[in-house]
Structure formats: structure tokens, C-alpha cells
Amino acid sequence: MQDKAVTDHFQNEWQNLMARSQRQATKRVTIKDIAQAAGVSITTVSNVLNNRPDEMTKQTLERILAVMDELDYRPNSMARGLASRRTSTIGVVIAEIETPLFLQLLSFIEPIAREAGYNLLMFKAHAMEDEKQAIKVLAAKQVDGLIFLSVSQYTDDAHLDELQRLEIPAVFVNRAQLHDGFDHINWDDAGGVDQATEHLIRLGHQRIAHLRGPLSRQSGANRLAGYRSALERHGLPYNDRYVRSGDYTATPEHWRQSTFELLELSPRPTAIIASDDIVAAVAMQAIYQAGLRIPQDVAVVGFDNQHFGPYLHPALTTVCLPLPETGRRAVELVLERIVAQRTTAKHVKLPCSLIVRASCGATA
Amino acid sequence: MQDKAVTDHFQNEWQNLMARSQRQATKRVTIKDIAQAAGVSITTVSNVLNNRPDEMTKQTLERILAVMDELDYRPNSMARGLASRRTSTIGVVIAEIETPLFLQLLSFIEPIAREAGYNLLMFKAHAMEDEKQAIKVLAAKQVDGLIFLSVSQYTDDAHLDELQRLEIPAVFVNRAQLHDGFDHINWDDAGGVDQATEHLIRLGHQRIAHLRGPLSRQSGANRLAGYRSALERHGLPYNDRYVRSGDYTATPEHWRQSTFELLELSPRPTAIIASDDIVAAVAMQAIYQAGLRIPQDVAVVGFDNQHFGPYLHPALTTVCLPLPETGRRAVELVLERIVAQRTTAKHVKLPCSLIVRASCGATA
DNA sequence: TCGCTTTAGTAAAGCGCTACAGTAGATATA
DNA sequence: TATATCTACTGTAGCGCTTTACTAAAGCGA
């Protein structure tokens, strides 16, 4: 019995020792250690952390930097965040969509944000409910700002008041409704399709069809508008028969069928502008199935410039969204709010560009 | 002079008032406020925050919850992180690659992590240097764990010692080199291509070509191995002439040329297995350019199951990586380390599956 | 020399939590 | 009845920083 107790005692002792040494091993070096080692106060060290070199002599600065380097010091951002109420973190709320577009955009945003010293906290939202949750979670994480990448089909945005109340700067990318007080970046879809349509007209096409998305979505309505504006400008009639639509639940089969319908019209359209690259690819499948050639019989243009475009047969002419620029501007806008304390809302509209490949017949 | 002073005085007074009221307005409600309002100590409130309801009576719990709800309390995760040394944040380091594969994977990881109460801090790394930086930054952000999504071509992984030293759990997805002490998830590329090859053999193909990736990459070597193993098992000869390669700098033009070379062989191969879907798409372009039909003259199989596969003409048969499962397992592995304190390394190999569409000729 | 400003710092009060050591009172145990 | 154990808490140190207020010493013109 006694032996057992003794054994236990030593075992505990030993465990304590281990625990202590482990804690020692993993003990992080803090600002205090740096201050001590450099022979200055922690305030001075804090000043170098916060990039205020004119608060001290050059020697002091260099000594502190050297000590930091030597001790491999990493400031604890939790502590910084707690004390300063700034976290150098931006939340990105991404709507779940079929196309990898927004994820791609995310990959453009990250390096730009990082360069400015910010990190990205990601949140995938596929409904308004999720967006509400996103705000809640990301606010609790004390993000300095938010970027929303959305498919713009929410009607009730009451949950955004929360943002205003919490004074979290937010920028909305591709959101249909504009929200007072928030920054917005939208794409000139209409201009993009206008360019594409004009390009086809210049190539001699007179009967241009359009596979359009739902009008309830900004993109659907705007792309149709661009199609019409180009026709109009060039004195071509807008013909309902040449326009087929599908909503966001439309299956490939639906688009295939729509394309068949277009191809059976007489006179047959000589070109099809699809609402996006996937629809364009399906249309191409249908055109081949109908025994026709691309672009000789029917030219095809897509939208989104997805990465598979060049590898379709023939390579797809498409409208390109300015994703890198969008990412850059999104970060800029939110940082202007955070750092430069801008309070007036900005609305940025970015142009799309036409990427000409073989499917429109311009390059043989 | 006196008037000026008085004016100044009042102006200051007023500014102070404003400042105070503004601070009041934006003042966050803290655990202290909740404790006060509920008539308990902050420890008790902390206990409900940390999900320890058996430390108090049901009434107390409910009262606290009610007060929290009423005051719209949100715990400050910076403070929690500082005090507990846990942040409920996982860092995800994504290698930049051409395909949207890893970004897609990210979108699977996020909801699973969130469900477990974790958020994702994203970092895009395109080189070893960046990975080092990622570890530095994410460690400073005090992430509880790390997930690496990589293209597995690093030779010097010395910077990973850092992770070990900092005791940050990490799981590597698709990394060629295994690192002692870390968890790994790899895909059975070989098995996937083996299945695809076997499928073609079953369909009657005797001369199956392979457009392979670089052997320096795990995927290149493994996919080739799968191709060979299936041939061997079915008693078909492995023929060098039917295998063309390209490294990771290979252009579409290179693959197009390689496909032409394969098509000019006699006897001509009746099927081509491409190293990925993009290469498959290029091969399809080349087959059409050569005036041949798919799949009647040449069957084609891809790899990756990218989202455009169904929309190629004909729809592409391809090998599918288990992305959702990969995401789930990655989160699981890292949480086992964080929460369940697992210390032994695990290595998970996940199977690929064959997705049969029209391009292999199985479905007419 | 005096009085003022500037320079180069320091000291300490938090930020909002967690974690751990207590404790009062009720209940069970010998 | 005395003691141990349990329940339902409380009090507070401290996590690693930032920030505000303060100061000693040097510089400087008159």
C-alpha cells in the first residue's frame, strides 16, 4: 500500500516534470521576452511591431529587430486583435454556385489581401439564412471587413442592417440590389454581350439567336439587354423567336432542346449567343447532333471565359469577366473603409471583354 | 482670449461627449454584462459558452441563455483565443494550379469544418517559399490546425519542421512525399486509371493509348502504373509507341501534336486515356481535326471529372476524384488531432471512381 | 540660466475571455 | 455527530498585446 503510494507520488512528480518541460518547450516567445532581451520596454517593442520607427532611434530599432529575429518572435495576433480591436482579417462570403467562378475570384482576392497584410476567412453561403449565419460567425471572429460574392437573387436583405450596426465595412460583388451605405462592384454584362453581338454582326451574321438566363437574375436581364442594344444599334430586328430562355434550374437537356428548336427555325439563325459557357457547350453538342458545323453553319459565343473554353471543338469565343480586377478592387474598397476610414459608398462597374476564338468563325 | 479658451473648453467637452456616446453606441456587450444581468459570475457564463451545462442548474442555464439572447451577445473570439490558446480556426494552404480542383475541394471542406465549429483561413501558395510564408502567417494567426492541398512537387520540405516544433497538426492532401508524424490523404490515381483501362478493354479495345503526365509528379507516375497494371492483368502488351508524355509545362499544342502522332500510327489505337480532362478535350479536338469520330473511331477517357465533362461532344468518360470524401476526411483527421489529441500519424488512401459517359462508346 | 519643446523612451491599465483554485451549503457516509 | 463528498457556484490571475498618460534628458533660443 505504501509502495503504491510512493510509486504514485513519483509518477505524479514525473508527469509534472514532463508537463512542465513540455510547456517550456512550447512556450511562445512574447513581446515581453523581446523587450527584456533588447533592454527596452514592451511599448517600444510594440512600436516596432506597429511600424512606428520614428518613435525610437535607429539603433534601438535595429537591436529590437535583431532580437526578434534571433528569438524567432511571432506576434500573437489574438492578443493584438483583442487589444487593438483590429484583426487584419477579411471575411469572404461566397455563394454556392455551379460554376467555379467565385472560387476563382477568391483565389485572386487572397494574394492581394495578403500583400496588404490581411488574411481571408472563408464562408460558403448558399442561401440568405446562411448569409445571416455568416455575418454572425464572422462578426464574432472580429473580421475587419467583409466581401460578399453572390448570385444576387435575395429579396430580403434585412440581415444586412446587422452589418451597419456592427460597423463592419462590406463590399458586394455582383449583387443585384444595391444597399445604401455599402460598396458594390458589378460587371457590365450588358456591355459584354453587346460587344459579342456586334462582333457577330460585323462578321456578317443577320440572324443571331440568344439562349438567355432568367430575367430574375441580374445577369439574365443584362445579357439580354446587351444583345438587344447591339441589334438595335445596327438596325437589325429583335425577333422573339430567336430567343429561348431557361431559369436557373434549367437542365442541359432543356438547353439542348432549346437549341434544336432554334436550329429548326426557318430561316435558321446563323449564330447563337449563350448565357454562359456551359450553355454554349451544350448548344455545340446539339448543333453537332443536328448534323451542322461550327462555325460554318452556326457560330457560337459563350460567356464567363471558363478555363475549358479553349479546349472545346472548336475553341469557344466568349465574354470574359474581369476577375483579377474585380478581386483587386474588392480588396481596395474594403481597405479604404478600414484604413482610410472612407464612409461614402462607392459603386464600381467593371467592363467585360470579348475573347475571340474559333467558334464564332472570326479565326479560321 | 478668454472667450476663445472658454469656447475651446466647451468644444472639447462636446467632443468628449460625442466620443463617449459613440463609444457607448458601438460598445460590445461582454461576458461581464451578461453575468451582471443574469446575476451570476462570469465563470458561470463562461461555462455556458463552453458548453458545460452540468456545472449549473437548468434554471441558471436558461436564465443566462435568455439574457444572452436579449442582449444579443456575441462572444469575442479574439479574447477566447487569447485566453484558451484555441481559435477554432483551421488554415488551408492551397497550391496554385491550373485546374479548379483544389478550390473546389476548399468549398467542400468549409461547410464540414463549420459544422464542427471551425472556420477556414485561406492561404494560396504557389511555391515552397510561399508555403513557408503560409506557415509563418497562419501560425501567427494561431490556427488550431492546417490542411495542405498541394501538387506534390516539392523536394525540400525542411520548412515543415516548423510545424512540428509549433505542434500544429497538419494534414497533407495529395502530397507525394510522406512526412513522418503528419497525416496524409492521397488518391488512388492508379486504381482509377486501372478501372478506366479495364473498362475500355471490356468494350473490346486492344490498342489503348495513353497521354501521360510527367513521371516527376505522383499523378503522372501513378496513372501510368494503373494503365500498365490493367493491360498486364488482361494479357495485353504494353507498347511504348502508344504512350506519349508531356510535363507540366506542356501546351495544348503539344498534346494536340501528340494526339496526331498517335492517330498516325498503324495500327491506330482505338482508344486514348488522357492524363486529365483538359488533355482529353484537346485530344478530342485533334481527333476531330484528323477527320475521325468519337467514340466510333477513337474512344477517349479523361481524369478529374471536371464540371465541363458532360458538355463536351460527346460527353467525356472520366475518372472521378472523391473530393467530398477527401474534404470530410481532411477535416476529420485534423480535428482528431486537435480535439481527440491523437498523436499517431494516419495515412488515408481514397479510391477514385469511373464515370462512364459517351466518349468511351459504352453508352450510345 | 530659464523656460519651452522635442526626443526617446517607460509604466500600467485594460481588451474579453478561460482556467483554476476556492467555497458555502446540501447531502451522503461511517 | 463528525467527516467526506457533491453541487452549484464565485473570485481572480493572466493570456500577449495596444494605448494612454507620463517622464527624464537633451536641445535650443533668449
Image: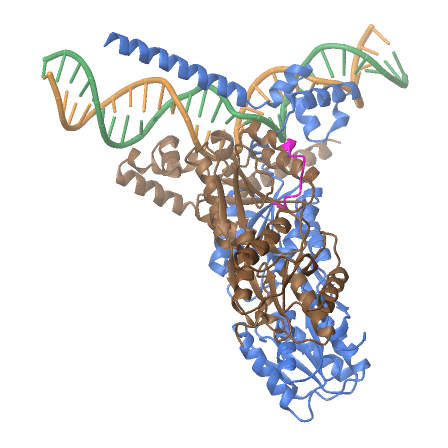
Chain colours: A blue, B brown, C orange, D green
Numbered label tally: 0
- Along the line of sight, the residue nearer the viewer: B113 or B54: B113
Quadrant for the C terminus of chain A in the image: bottom right
Magenta highlight on residue B154: yes
Left or right: residue C7 versus residue B179 is: right
Picture residue at 64% right of the left edge, 21% below the top: A42
Picture residue at 65% right of the left edge, 86% below the top: A242
Magenta highlight on residue A171: no
By secondary structure, the bulk of the magenta-drawn segment is best described as loop
Picture residue at 68% right of the left edge, 29% below the top: A49
Q: Position of residue B275 (x, y in %)?
A: 64, 57
Left or right: residue B220 versus residue B85 is: right
Q: Position of residue B63 (x, y in %)?
A: 32, 42
Quadrant for the N terminus of chain A in the image: top left
- Residue A147: in sight, yes or no? no
- Residue B132: in sight, yes or no? yes
Furthest-bottom residue in this view: A266
Q: Position of residue B36 (x, y in %)?
A: 38, 35
- Along the line of sight, the residue nearer the viewer: B88 or B247: B247
Q: Position of residue A341 (x, y in %)?
A: 68, 45
Seen in the picture, residue B280 relative to A294 is either above or below; the reply is above
Residue A180, located in which quarter of the rendered image? bottom right
Q: Which residues are magenta?
A: B150-159
